[in-house]
Image (cartoon, helix red, strand yellow):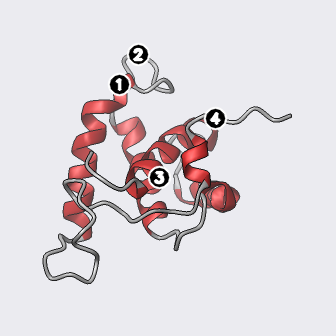
Amino acid sequence: MEKRDPRLSAALEPAGRPQGPRGETGAGPGSPDAPGPEEHWRIQEEHWRAAYASRPYVTSGAPFQAFAIAYRFGWEAALDSAGRRFEDVESELSRRWRRERGPDRLRWEHARPAVLDAWIRALRPGPG
């Protein structure tokens, strides 16, 4: 039996509502109070900049920029997922990553955990 990343179980369920910039779920994309995508991403980026070094897939001393693009990729993919599960779109995401990442970016095998982390965070309801 294939061993699965334990964090993946949350991402395998149908997607929840994307969280707002401070973790709230009330101001949806069509709401006049909803911040724009760049404001949402700025707040997510602040979170990941503070948290990335403690993630198990980040080697000691790795710069944030090595993972920043993977976090944004996962966050945007989750918001565009139309309720699909990570497991259902992973091969598509892998192909997109390989096509779009450029020569200086992480290989999918190294980016995947960061993409999954951002996916889970983007779709988790509630604060944080």
Does dot 2 land on a helix, a strand or a loop?
loop
The residue carrying mark 2 is 60
The reply, left or right, for residue 94 in relation to residue 54 is right
The reply, left or right, for residue 54 in relation to residue 40 is right
x and y, in percent, of residue 79 in the image:
43, 66
Image quadrant occupied by the N terminus: top right
x and y, in percent, of residue 64 in the image:
33, 34
The residue carrying mark 1 is 53
Task: Give the residue type at disc 3.
Answer: Trp
Characterize the local packing of mark 1: few (<14), some (14-19) or many (20 or more) Cα atoms within 10 angstroms.
some
* Residue occupying image coordinates x 45% and y 55%: 73
Of badges 1 and 3, the one in the foreground is: 3
Please tell me which of labels 4 and 1 falls first in the chain.
4
Q: Is residue 103 above or below residue 25?
A: above
Q: Is residue 102 above or below residue 62?
A: below
| Quadrant position of residue 88 | bottom right
Q: CA distance from mark 4 to mark 2?
A: 21 Å
* Residue occupying image coordinates x 64% and y 61%: 89
Pointer 1 with pointer 2, Cβ within 8 A: yes
Task: Give the residue type at disc 2.
Answer: Ser
Please tell me which of labels 1 and 3 falls first in the chain.
1
* Residue occupying image coordinates x 35% and y 25%: 53
The reply, left or right, for residue 2 in relation to residue 93 is right
Please tell me which of labels 2 and 3 falls first in the chain.
2
The residue carrying mark 3 is 119
Please tell me which of labels 4 and 2 falls first in the chain.
4
The residue carrying mark 4 is 5
Of badges 1 and 2, the one in the foreground is: 1
Residue at the outermost right position:
1
